[in-house]
Amino acid sequence: MQIRPLYDRLVVRRIENQETVLNGIIIPDSAKEKPQEAEVMAAGRGKRLEDGTVVPLDVKVGDRILFGKYSGSDIKIDGQEYLILREDEVLGILDPVAVTA
């Protein structure tokens, strides 16, 4: 199933951090905080201004982003969990670090 978000909305998939075990105690999923880092799976065409012009988004499909803790709406499509949020809820884009030898 394909989803195409409208205007300045993004469909993102949370990037799960590895499970941490502290002194042999496994933390249950219900006690863990949801990650605030995600990969953009789909992006709308841009934000429509009052005069009707469309401003393209700075965020592109494939970008890794950071977003606020209570941002967006959780959805489930074909058994996968996604989040739909507006571009203005994105706090930043994570750029890959170039490794120099």
Image: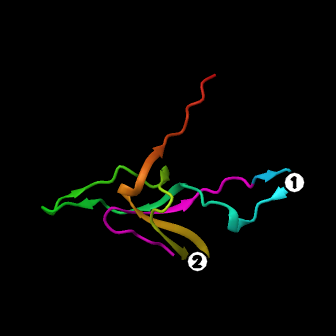
Which residue is farthest right?
24
Seen from the viewer's position, the closer of residues 54 and 94 is 94
Q: Indicate the secondary structure of the residue bearing disc 1.
A: loop
Label 1 or label 2, whichever lies nearer to me, is 1
- Which dot marks residue 78? 2
Q: Give above or below for 66 relative to 32.
A: above
**Magenta-colored segment: predominant secondary structure:** loop
Q: Which badge, 1 or 2, is on the more N-terminal residue?
A: 1
Seen from the viewer's position, the closer of residues 62 and 22 is 22
The residue positioned 60% from the left and 71% from the top of the image is: 80
Q: Residues within 10 Å of mark 2 (few under 14, many from 20)?
A: few
Residue under label 1, please give it.
Answer: 24
User: Percent x, y for residue 89?
Assistant: 40, 57
Seen from the viewer's position, the closer of residues 29 and 100 is 29
User: Percent x, y for residue 17?
Assistant: 67, 53
The residue positioned 71% from the left and 53% from the top of the image is: 18
Q: Which residues are magenta?
A: 1-19
